[in-house]
């Protein structure tokens, strides 16, 4: 079978048509894997086409109609991907929902999308849907994949996934025209049809249903498959949430276009182990995953022997000096190449093998800014790690680094066939092959987001560097000024803080105030390991966060960020003057984060208003009571007296504030 990139032909303008193409030209190649009960199971493209057809024909027998919207709820499972494919084949619209969404959030999406059917992973998701039946009256049937715990349920409107497939297979056996009817359904699909509806994360308000058409999705995926030279010999680990545009683009769309295999982990708890076993060639992870991996490596090295530690750090120095230059194809002295090759044998290779990165050809990170040192660390090991910037409304890619032209402080130039402009307000706007059609039932929001001539507002402020690569500063609406006129870009400050492994989350305040302040969440794993090594006892996150030594550690990190800010003329006036460590972790279940782990800034400002005022009224501490949601849905309260610490402003080059004014 040829390894070359096979671009979609004009006739292959929907994903079901691509599925048929893959079954025809690479039928015996692996399409999807799943680890179940410790064993990897594999389906070829031909087998996937059969599984999808069986489900689709059974789905029709249960009342599915062209145009129906189908909720897909659960983690990455082959059956849920097959449900997406079958829904598209029958002219319906899949609507993935985050598996960890609480019942209320689930009901909001299902009601807004006018969902008629739901295909879910297990009993937990069934229970959530049944608990909101009064708010989702349009749902006719629920289909579930995992039958455990479902025996005693009323199955009048509940169906096992395999039972639906059995209905479809019986129809194939009894009706000679069923197979042709299935092909006719696929052939009736048009590129202009809505292929999927993905809901925005709701960072700035109520989530919106982003409608994406088949031909635009395929056009965008085809561009990046060619850009990164992906083929049917590649493999990716499908662990990203089904409801996030990243999974539907990076795994589903690119996998369908290129014909590569996606592997579903056994569970979210086994992702790292499954990653090592699969050894993907194409990989995506947010910066936090790369941070956690590095933290784990460094913690393990603390327990290694002195000789191993010395060798490890020596060759990391070699990698730092030569690694990125070799990866970029630059000239490196022979001695440097020989040393680096020895490091590959003794350190870099074994380390990548432990992390599951040995076979990676192309890797991306996005979602938040990644620290330059962290980014360079992985690239210095020979890992082709790049950045991209994207949005659901763009069908992900707006920018992407090209091989050999990678910079840690940018998100790259425009992706293939994408146009970008910087509006007069400093906002980034774009036009792209994959951009959305409209927001579902929200014409006003569509008009606000998309101009008449097709430019889409990102809501992000940015600028182009001299080499044409884009730099993102912050959300445009969040960029403000201190009372003395100094520029205040909260996300810029927060990302600098989050470069430290001990800091998991940060929320900065300062717009319209005299100085900048921050809330900080410590990283429980990283700080917990520090506590264990230093014989610091604690019983909870709250207790560890309040520990004086932890405050001292975070104070050093804040001081380091202030030194960095002082060296930047534009940002020097926004140094952090006061900070506190929150008594609880920010949590999506409490409404403080979106399901994609983005900070809901306005909600936090309202919820913790007393703490914000304490940061500005000179208080040394503040007593608070905060309502929390436990895993079982019960509500409770956390009570704490939160310490507030002052920071000394670092002297900086004169004129920064005057320039800002």
Image: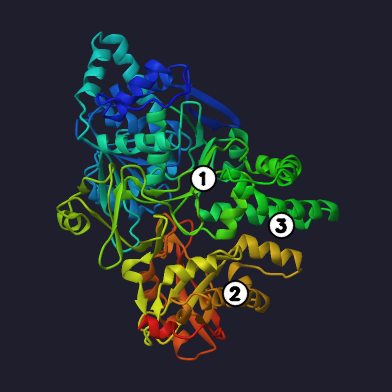
Q: Find disc 3 in the rendering and name its residue.
A: 299
Q: Is residue 127 above or below residue 229?
A: below
The answer to which of 332 and 543 lies nearer the viewer is 332
Q: Secondary structure at mark 2?
A: helix
Relative placement, left or right, of 148 versus 537 is: left
Instruction: Check whether the beta carbons of the residues at disc 3 and disc 1 lie within 8 A of each other.
Output: no
Lower sequence index among marks 3 and 1: 3
The x and y percentages for residue 306 are: 84, 56
Relative placement, left or right, of 514 versus 381 is: left
- Measuring 46% from the left and 62% from the top, which residue is drawn there? 587
Front position among marks 3 and 2: 2
Q: Find disc 2 in the rendering and name its residue.
A: 560
Which numbered dot is residue 404? 1
Note whether residue 99 is visible: yes
Q: Secondary structure at mark 3?
A: helix
- Measuring 71% from the left and 55% from the top, which residue is drawn there? 317
The answer to which of 635 and 342 lies nearer the viewer is 342
């Amino acid at each position: 079978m040829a390894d070359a990139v096979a671009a979609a032909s004009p006739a292959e303008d929907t994903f079901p048509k691509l599925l048929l193409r893959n079954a025809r030209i690479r039928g015996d190649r692996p399409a999807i894997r799943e680890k179940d009960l410790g064993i990897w199971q594999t389906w070829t493209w031909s087998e996937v086409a059969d599984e999808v057809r069986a489900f689709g024909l059974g789905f029709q027998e249960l009342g599915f109609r062209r145009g129906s919207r189908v909720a897909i709820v659960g983690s990455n499972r082959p059956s849920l991907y097959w449900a997406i494919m079958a829904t598209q084949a029958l002219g319906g619209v899949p609507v993935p929902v985050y598996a960890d969404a609480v019942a209320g959030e689930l009901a909001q999406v299902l009601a807004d999308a006018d969902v008629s059917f739901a295909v879910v992973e297990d009993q937990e998701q069934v229970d959530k849907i049944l608990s909101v039946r009064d708010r989702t009256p349009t749902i006719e049937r629920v289909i579930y994949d995992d039958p455990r715990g479902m025996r005693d349920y009323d199955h009048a409107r509940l169906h096992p996934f395999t039972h639906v497939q059995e209905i479809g297979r019986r129809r194939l056996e009894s009706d000679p025209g069923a197979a042709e009817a299935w092909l006719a359904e696929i052939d009736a699909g048009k590129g202009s049809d809505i292929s999927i509806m993905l809901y925005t994360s709701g960072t700035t308000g109520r989530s919106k249903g982003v409608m994406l058409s088949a031909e635009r999705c395929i056009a965008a995926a085809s561009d990046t498959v060619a850009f990164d030279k992906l083929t049917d010999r590649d493999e990716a680990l499908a662990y990203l949430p089904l409801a996030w545009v990243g999974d539907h683009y990076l795994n589903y769309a690119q996998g369908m276009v290129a014909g590569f295999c996606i592997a579903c982990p056994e569970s979210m708890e086994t992702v790292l182990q499954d990653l090592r076993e699969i050894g993907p060639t194409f990989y995506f992870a947010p910066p936090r995953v790369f941070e956690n991996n590095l933290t784990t490596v460094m913690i393990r090295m603390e327990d290694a022997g002195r000789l191993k530690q010395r060798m490890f750090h020596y060759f990391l120095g070699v990698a730092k000096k030569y690694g990125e230059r070799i990866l970029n194809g630059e000239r490196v002295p022979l001695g440097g190449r020989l040393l680096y090759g020895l490091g590959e044998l003794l350190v870099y290779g074994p380390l990548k093998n432990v992390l599951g990165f040995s076979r990676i050809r192309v890797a991306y990170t996005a979602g938040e800014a990644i620290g330059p040192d962290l980014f360079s660390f992985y690239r210095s090991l020979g890992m082709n790690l790049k950045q991209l910037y994207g949005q659901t409304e763009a069908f992900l890619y707006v920018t992407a680094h090209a091989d050999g032209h990678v910079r840690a402080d940018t998100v790259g130039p425009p992706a293939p066939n994408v146009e970008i402009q910087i509006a007069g307000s400093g906002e980034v706007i774009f036009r792209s092959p994959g951009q959305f059609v409209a927001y579902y039932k929200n014409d006003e929001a569509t008009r606000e987001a998309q101009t008449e001539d097709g430019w889409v507002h990102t809501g992000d402020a940015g600028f182009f560097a001299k080499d044409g690569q884009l730099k993102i500063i912050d959300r445009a609406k969040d960029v403000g000024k201190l009372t003395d006129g100094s520029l205040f870009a909260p996300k810029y400050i927060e990302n600098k803080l989050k470069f430290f492994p001990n800091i998991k989350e940060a929320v900065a305040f300062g717009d319209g105030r005299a100085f900048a302040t921050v809330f900080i969440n410590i990283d429980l794993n990283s700080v917990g390991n520090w506590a264990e090594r230093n014989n610091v006892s604690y019983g909870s996150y709250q207790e560890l966060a309040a520990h004086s030594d932890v405050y001292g550690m975070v104070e050093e990190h804040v001081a380091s960020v202030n030194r960095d800010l002082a060296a930047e003329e534009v940002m020097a006036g926004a140094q952090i003057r006061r900070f506190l460590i929150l008594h609880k972790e920010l949590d999506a279940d409490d409404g403080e984060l979106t399901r994609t782990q983005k900070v809901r800034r306005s909600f936090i400002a309202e919820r913790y208003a007393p703490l914000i005022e304490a940061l500005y009224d000179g208080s040394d501490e503040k007593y608070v009571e905060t309502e929390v949601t436990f895993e079982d849905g019960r509500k409770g309260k956390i009570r704490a007296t939160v310490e507030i610490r002052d920071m000394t402003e670092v002297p900086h080059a004169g004129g920064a504030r005057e320039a800002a004014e």
